[in-house]
Amino acid sequence: MAFKIYTKTGDLGKTSLIGGTKVSKSHIRIETYGTIDELNSYIGLINDNLDHQHSKKALQEIQDRLFTIGSSLACDPDKEPLMKIPDLGEQDIAFLESEIDAMNEVLPAMKSFILPGGHVTVSTIHIARCICRRAERLCVHLQEESLFVDPLVIKYLNRLSDYLFILARYAAHLLGIAEIPWRPRVKDQG
């Protein structure tokens, strides 16, 4: 028999965390791992639009890590120690830093802020970067509300947003697209 995607258990606005605890679909934990899922989907879109094989492989690794983070956030923290949930490690952050450093070696120094845009792929990467920052803010909010979130998740998301910023610049470089510098309009003093 085929697995049914619908269970009807959420029809009244509740859902279950991994571990069985029922919470409102508007609970910050649900919002947080839903944002991770949104980010993961955008990373998939980016991967579909990039032709650079090394970056594609890195993005697949990142998607795997985002599933790990989503699993962690979807768990009832009181029941999580009893379950086998994939883990995130310092080596995952080191991987992002290594990728950032490698891309930065071929990029020109930034002389101004840059505007997102110039090519659909570049713009999509910037959208993913913004979603990543939102996910990071939501994790910090969880922490501030004394709702458990592994501090490594926040660190990973912070580094991932840096990675996505550099990837946007790198994609523009690979595509031969000029970056769009931000030219602030200054009020005339006269």
Image (cartoon, rainbow, N blue to C red):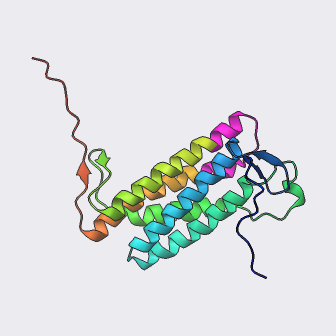
Residue 20 horizontal/vertical position (percent) = 85, 54
Residue 174 in the image, given as x and y percentages of width and height:
30, 70
Quadrant placement of the N terminus: bottom right
- Vertical relation: 133 (above or below) 173: above
Corner quadrant of residue 190: top left
Figure label count: 0
Verify whether residue 105 appears in magenta: no
Residues rendered magenta in the picture: 139-155
Q: Is residue 109 shown left or right of residue 132?
A: left
Residue 144 counted in the magenta span: yes
Q: Is residue 33 left or right of residue 75?
A: left
Horizontal side of residue 71 vs 177, given as left or right:
right
Q: Is residue 140 visible?
A: yes
> Can you name the residue that lies furthest to the top here?
190
Q: Is residue 57 above or below residue 158?
A: below
Can see residue 169? no
Residue at image location 85% in from the left, 56% down from the top: 19
